[in-house]
Amino acid sequence: MVVLDTNVIIDFLEGKENIVAEVSKYPPSELSMTFVNEYELLKYKNRERLEPALQNLAVHHSNEAAVRAAANSYRQLKAKGKMLSDNDIMIYGVCTAHDEVLLTQDKGFEELGSNRVIVLG
């Protein structure tokens, strides 16, 4: 599965052509999100518009492996003097623990140097 980051989900639903084209490369059954993305989307001001789409995405939850992967990523970034938000670090940890690839527009993820992240330009 491919985990869609919050910014990708919002832009997909808004019909941004480049994002729609990228997401459409994957079968709908291979698209998912993390519990952190779900949280971010449900607090979004246009929640009512988003909820039907969210029901079609599998949700990956946290576990011990996700917490450890997130903590390791935090330490790696801190050592470089770079940082991501705690939410982003946890999203990455969940993706790592579930052996998934994250599709995002957040260039900050490039600092991780991971093949588990696709940053859309």
Image (cartoon, rainbow, N blue to C red):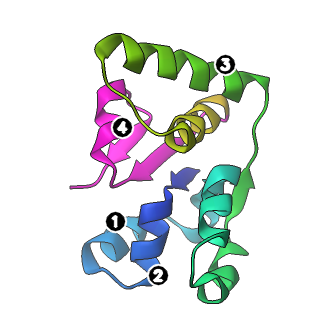
> Left or right of 43: which side holds 86?
left
Distance from the alpha carbon under mark 1 to that under mark 3: 30 Å
SS class of the residue under badge 1?
A: helix
- Residue nearer the viewer, 79 or 35: 79
Magenta stretch bounds: 98-121
Distance from the alpha carbon under mark 3 to that under mark 2: 32 Å
Image quadrant where one finds the C terminus: bottom left
Q: Is residue 103 magenta?
A: yes
Residue 61 lies in quadrant: top right
> Left or right of 42: which side holds 73?
left
SS class of the residue under badge 2?
A: helix
Q: Is residue 65 above or below residue 57?
A: above
Q: Earlier in the sequence, mark 1 or mark 3?
A: 1
Position in image of residue 66 (x %, y %): 68, 29
Q: Which mark is residue 96?
A: none
Position in image of residue 118 (x %, y %): 35, 45
Tag 2 residue:
13
Tag 4 residue:
109
Mark 4 or 1: in front is 4
Tag 3 residue:
68
Q: Are there few (<14), some (14-19), or many (20+) residues within 10 Å of tag 3?
A: some
Residue displayed at 27% across by 80% down: 17
Is there CB contact under 8 Å for labels 4 and 1?
Answer: no
Is there CB contact under 8 Å for labels 1 and 2?
Answer: no
Is there CB contact under 8 Å for labels 4 and 2?
Answer: no
